[in-house]
């Protein structure tokens, strides 16, 4: 995304017309910024974070829902297999990833204020559908396969929440000057990411309200699963009302389709998008999958600690919380030592701690496994910040190289590469989110043997024994992730840290602070 800058007279800051459209906006003008721009931008940022936070919450809602489907009476007499459950959490991830590109173009089309209202209103669809599915018995009365098909459709609707990130980031980027944009976008992203932790912390507590602990601690217990959808509706409506009355739209915000098409031909676009699969793909993929992975990998631990299993969803929310907090730290550290160096060591450390998590599974140590994954979440959050920091620096260096090599006009070339960098951020966000879907597919395929073993067992006791006997099912998936992180680390070193000769015609970007 880019903007067509219109410089207003300093005595006409932020002129409004009908519908809270601002006709003149020049945040690079320091007098304008201090007099009016800063206050308006901060107000829009606050309500943008609120709406995006809810988007992430709804996007990941099914990571909690799948843990309670059997207790809510679904399955048609046959519990859903691990493979089916992973598909129910992966589909919202896939849909949300696909929506990120069109959501980016929605802000210039509808205006940031109106689109925030619309995108928030769309969140009422998946929440209402989930509540209706649970409240009415129509779905429960269907066969197992029909139930699963209906749930796939309802789970896919939660993907509306995944697109909110791109439109929210695009909208806020227009309000802030370049030198303040990093902090604003970092806060916006972190506030949204925190929605994952909030939904995984609060939803298990709400759906168990009114159920005595003596009953809730049993593996099979009643739940009010409809509350998982209903509880978010008042907040969604509040976000819609707040956006309508307090947010603004900028007439000077324009969709730059030419920059999108141009950056698609730039190899750096695809390199950074692949690296973002390793960072944000890990964050969102593990956020979706970890509660279910814990349930399937450590059933004996959850049986011994029913409070953790029932009320805290296996503590899965802590990972998303940690990853959200460390994202700004990754950007801060990148400003000091370079984004590529931070990203390289993030991938190296993620591979090492994934290996440690595998050791925890084999040793049946929940503490080792869980502790390792908390570090992985922290690293993925820092990596999200460092990779996003790399993109504008890389394209800035490419612009300077073109100016030096071809004698191109400095102002026009700098602006063109700045616009391409903004476009790459949107593309990388969509492809990186798709990485979360890939992670869940790896887990789903790895879970097939344990699912088959449990399904073939006859009695409840035999099924429990089969689950425990195959509790190391996730090690094959973890091995694939280790290989992936090694590849990502090698790519980071090869393209951005190794020394190259001028004759090789490969732009060495280490000098640019990447």
Image (spheres, rainbow, N blue to C red):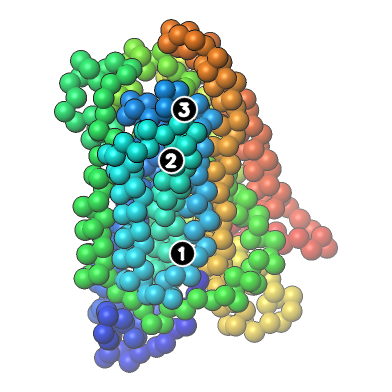
x and y percent of residue 436 in the render?
A: 53, 43
Residue 476 visible in the current orientation: yes
Pointer 2 residue:
151
- Tell me: residue 443, above or below residue 494: above
x and y percent of residue 418 in the render?
A: 55, 72
- Badge 2: few (under 14), some or many (20 or more) residues near its Cα, within 10 Å? some
- Badge 1: few (under 14), some or many (20 or more) residues near its Cα, within 10 Å? many
Q: How many marks?
A: 3
What's the CA distance linking mark 2 and mark 1? Answer: 25 Å
What's the CA distance linking mark 3 and mark 1? Answer: 33 Å
What's the CA distance linking mark 3 and mark 2? Answer: 11 Å
The residue lying at 35 percent from left, 14 percent from top is: 303
The residue lying at 39 percent from left, 88 percent from top is: 7
x and y percent of residue 105 in the render?
A: 48, 70
Query: Quick one: label 3 or label 2, which is nearer the N terminus?
Result: 3
Q: Residue 80 has which mark?
A: 3
- Badge 3: few (under 14), some or many (20 or more) residues near its Cα, within 10 Å? many
Residue 307 visible in the current orientation: no
x and y percent of residue 262 in the render?
A: 65, 72
The residue lying at 71 percent from left, 49 percent from top is: 494
Pointer 1 residue:
103
Observer-nearest residue: 437 or 39? 437
- Tell me: residue 204, above or below residue 43: above
Q: Are marks 3 and 1 in contact (CB under 8 Å)?
A: no
Q: Quadrant of residue 449?
A: top right
């Amino acid at each position: 995304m880019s903007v067509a800058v219109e410089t207003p007279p300093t005595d006409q800051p932020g002129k409004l017309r009908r519908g809270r459209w601002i006709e003149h906006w020049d945040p690079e003008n320091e007098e304008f910024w201090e007099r009016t721009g800063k206050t308006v931008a901060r107000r829009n940022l606050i309500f943008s974070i609120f709406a995006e936070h809810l988007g992430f919450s709804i996007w990941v809602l099914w990571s909690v829902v799948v843990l309670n489907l059997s207790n809510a009476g679904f399955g048609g007499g046959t519990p859903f297999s691990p493979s089916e459950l992973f598909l129910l959490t992966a589909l919202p991830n896939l849909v949300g990833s696909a929506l990120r590109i069109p959501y980016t173009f929605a802000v210039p089309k509808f205006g940031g204020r109106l689109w925030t209202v619309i995108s928030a209103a769309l969140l009422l669809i998946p929440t209402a559908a989930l509540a209706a599915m649970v409240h009415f018995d129509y779905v429960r009365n269907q066969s197992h396969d029909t139930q699963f098909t209906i749930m796939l459709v309802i789970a896919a609707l939660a993907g509306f929440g995944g697109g909110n990130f791109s439109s929210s980031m695009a909208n806020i980027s227009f309000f802030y000057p370049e030198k303040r944009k990093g902090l604003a976008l970092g806060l916006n992203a972190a506030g949204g990411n925190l929605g994952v932790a909030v939904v995984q912390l609060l939803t298990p507590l709400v759906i168990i309200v009114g159920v005595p602990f003596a009953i809730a601690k049993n593996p099979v217990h009643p739940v009010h699963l409809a509350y998982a959808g209903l509880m978010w509706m008042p907040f969604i409506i509040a976000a819609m009302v707040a956006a309508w009355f307090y947010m603004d739209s900028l007439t000077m915000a324009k969709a730059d389709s030419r920059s999108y098409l141009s950056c698609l031909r730039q190899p750096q676009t695809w390199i950074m998008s692949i690296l973002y699969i390793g960072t944000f793909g890990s964050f969102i993929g593990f956020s979706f999958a970890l509660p279910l992975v814990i349930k399937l990998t450590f059933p004996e631990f959850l049986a011994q600690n029913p409070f953790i299993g029932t009320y805290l969803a296996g503590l899965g929310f802590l990972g998303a919380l940690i990853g959200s907090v460390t994202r700004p730290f990754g950007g801060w550290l990148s400003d000091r030592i370079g984004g590529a160096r931070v990203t390289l060591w993030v991938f190296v450390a993620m591979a090492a701690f994934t290996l440690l998590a595998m050791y925890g599974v084999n040793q049946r140590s929940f503490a080792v496994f869980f502790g390792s994954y908390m570090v992985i979440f922290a690293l993925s959050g820092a990596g999200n910040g460092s990779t996003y920091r790399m993109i504008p620096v890389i394209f800035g260096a490419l612009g300077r190289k073109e100016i030096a090599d071809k004698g191109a006009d400095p102002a026009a070339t700098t602006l063109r590469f700045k616009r391409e960098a903004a476009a790459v951020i949107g593309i990388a966000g969509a492809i990186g989110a798709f990485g979360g879907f890939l992670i869940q597919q790896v887990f789903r395929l790895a879970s097939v043997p344990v699912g088959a073993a449990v399904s073939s067992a006859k009695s409840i006791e035999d099924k429990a024994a089969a689950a425990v006997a195959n509790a190391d099912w996730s090690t094959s998936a973890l091995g694939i992730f280790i290989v992936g992180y090694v590849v990502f680390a090698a790519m980071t070193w090869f393209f951005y840290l190794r020394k190259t000769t001028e004759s090789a015609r490969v732009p060495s970007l280490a000098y640019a602070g990447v």
